[in-house]
Amino acid sequence: MGRIMAVNISEKKGTQKKNVHSAKLIEDWGIENDAHAGKWHRQVSLLSYEKIEDFKAKGAPVDEGAFGENLIVRGIDLKHLPIGTRLQCGDVLLEVTQIGKQCHSGCEIYKIMGDCIMPREGIFTKVLKGGVISEGDEINVVKRPMRAAVLTSSDSGYAGEREDISGPAIQAMLEENGYEVVHTILLPDDREMLAKEMARIADEYVAELLLTTGGTGFSPRDCMPEATMDIAERMVPGIPEAMRAYSMTITPRAMLSRAAACIRKNTLIINLPGSPKAVKESLGYILPSLQHGLEILTGEAANCARK
């Protein structure tokens, strides 16, 4: 459990935030009348009360809001909260979207002290549910389900000539296994469009898991693996290898799958087959192992080691 020690806003950008003691938070916007509110991923900033006090003990002349923080929180180790962590304060629900940030060069605190704690200690959140936050309110970390997104690649589906069955099948399996499906989309077999949407989902922290279906075969228009590799930061070859090995016990044609898997930011991206039957078989096989990998990726679990 934590406690709100100050609620700070600045009505104009470039000016220091001031403690207003209580404020209204607006869903998918931020704090009412705060200049940094808006439809982006850094709607509300938080900083640890303990870290501020440690900094003051070094002789730093800082007031509430001096680091640009909206909420000063006591009793929670904010820096080590994984991306996607949710914080509940009364009716208000926040979700962590970023840990730390690049410091503005030459900020006043840095000029005086030669240091600034916001870049390494501050966190940023978006407002999932609005309400009023006041000094003295309790704030708690809330465990949440992993978020998932589903992307279907199909020219005929995008043109409305064929119903997408695989995408809804993936969504149903994810929800049955405790995932929160926050985004679904159907796009044509267009490498640039697919890559752009996958990158957006990862870069905007839309979901920790992104499953794609379709576009993994030999057709000249099949380009999902290429689009995936275009935006990959780290490849995860074991997952598609495991799916192919398992599917080979069902049909030798599984060797023809070109599916890939990768990590971008804090999102695991996995290509699944296009047919509903193959989707259910492949996803059913890998789902039990994904949760632990996602917890490691997002910082919710430590790496495992076998003796």
Image (tube, helix red, strand yellow):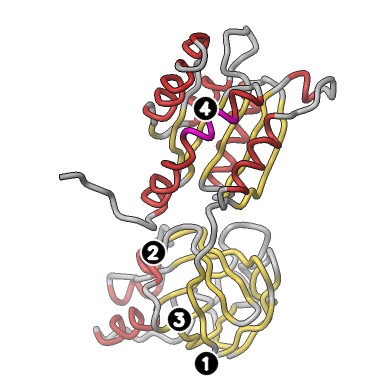
Where is mark 3, residue-wise?
Answer: 73
| Quadrant of the image containing the C terminus | top left
Quote the CA–CA distance across marks 3 and 4: 39 Å
Front residue of this view, candidates 227 and 161: 161
For image coordinates 61% across by 32% down, the residue present is 196
Mark 2 in CB contact with mark 4 (< 8 angstroms): no
Quote the CA–CA distance across marks 3 and 1: 10 Å
- N-terminal label among 2 and 3: 3
Vertical comparison of 148 with 272: above or below: below
The amino acid at mark 4 is Thr
Where is mark 1, residue-wise?
Answer: 136
Q: Which secondary structure, mark 2? A: helix
Where is mark 2, residue-wise?
Answer: 119
- N-terminal label among 4 and 1: 1
The amino acid at mark 1 is Gly
Mark 2 or mark 1, whichever is nearer to me: 1
Highlighted magenta segment, given as a residue range: 280-285
Quote the CA–CA distance across marks 2 and 4: 31 Å
Quote the CA–CA distance across marks 4 and 1: 47 Å
- N-terminal label among 3 and 4: 3
| Quadrant of the image containing the N terminus | bottom left
Mark 2 or mark 3, whichever is nearer to me: 3
Residue 194, position as x, y percentages in the image: 62, 28
